[in-house]
Image (spheres, rainbow, N blue to C red):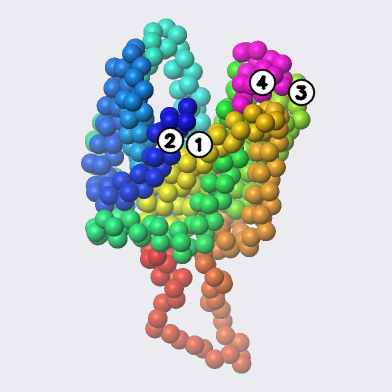
Amino acid sequence: VSALFIASQFLPALAAPALTARVDQLSLRGSLPAIYFAEAAVYAALAFISDRFLLVPVLALALVDGVLMLTARGLTRAAVSATLEPHGLLRQGNGLLNVAFAFATAGGAALGGIIIAASSVGDALLIDAASFVAVGLVLVSTSRLPAITEASEPFLRHLRAGVQRVREDRATRLLILGEGAAILFFALIVPIEVIYAKETLGTDDAGFGILLSSWGVGIVLGSLAFLRLRSRRIRTLILWSTAAIGVAYLGMAGATTLSLACAFSVLGGLGNGIQWVAVMTALQESTPVALQARITGLLESAASIMTGVGFLLGGLVVSVASPPAAYAVSGVGVCVLVLAAAAWPARAVPDAHGEEPPVYALVGAPPQLPHEPGPAEPVLESSEASPDSARRAGGT
């Protein structure tokens, strides 16, 4: 298990930012389909060896797939932002993608189980490979994919620009580091859900399935709720959705019946359905188009690493305590993060389209807004643009 975590999540999270910085200067019509075709080859190879398990090839293929997956996510998010943000439709588009992802996650898992039961693991993997080929062909036939970088530059300079953005921009740094910490606590309970259902709740396999399904129902509801609440201030959505997950984990820590645990699970899923897309949207809205792939790719990499760390910590807590203790640790950790984030000034998280006035300054004090001078005020003119206006125009 540890080897699979290192190969599929930890190492890809370290390697993917470099690959993203390499390919995001290329045409999306060529780079994205190539990545999907490569993923199809990985799944075809996994299908080929599925009947004769070989650890080293499986780990190698998991590593390649992890790098390709994280790179494709960063490029896709950049393409979505470059296409929709100029028209003010980023939140609507992200909301629709979030709903589609929620249904695809639930449907894909169910379909995989049906295929494996009716045929074999190898056939399920081959169908997965075919789906990647289909997506690649669709992208090849799309002639109007946007450019996500303005001009080519040396690779190392291009890579450093993304890292520099995280170091220098408070909003970017807060969103990536804060979400990484949150995902650690979110993932802490994932590896112990079966033990929790059977030992704490005293249920069977069917009850465990109902518990997981209740979280899935919540995710679908949360995804639909984001579409309806998309005009709300993004900081508010992040705080309340994260708090919902924390409260759900605390409730599940104290639950002793399946029905009560499922009720809290729906609440947690609802928060889950809003939280990630809200954080991603905030990051996209605060990032210049030319840096989108690298910055959103860094968020995806941070999420991958912290998911694995959360798995390991969850197992550790259960080994020294109990499943409810793991849920309690997770819930308390999430709630502490919410309180810490709420204490930050509102301008720390940008809001381009919320109901409250947008925050224009991502770092430092708010800019001076234009106003009519009073009778005793001189009218000052300057030929130089402010650092904030340059940053909004796409600089770093």
Q: x, y percentage for residue 369? A: 54, 74
Q: CA distance from mark 4 to mark 1?
A: 21 Å
Of pointers 1 and 2, the one earlier in the residue sequence: 2
Residues rendered magenta in the picture? 192-208
Closer to viewer: mark 3 or mark 2:
2
- Per the model, the C-alpha gap separating discs 1 and 2 is 8 Å
Rendered residue at 33%/13% (across/down): 52
Residue under pointer 2:
6
Q: Is residue 285 above or below residue 183?
A: below
Residue 197, numbered circle: 4
Upstream in sequence: badge 4 or badge 1: 4
Q: Secondary structure at mark 3?
A: loop
How far apart are the two marked residues, 3 and 4, measured between alpha carbons?
Answer: 10 Å
Camera-side mark, 4 or 1: 1
Q: What kind of residue is marked 2?
A: Ile
Q: Earlier in the sequence, mark 2 or mark 4?
A: 2
Residue 266 in view in this figure:
no
Whole-percent x, y for residue 298 in the image: 42, 49
Q: Amino acid at mark 1?
A: Gly
Question: Are dots 3 and 4 in contact, CB under 8 Å?
Answer: no
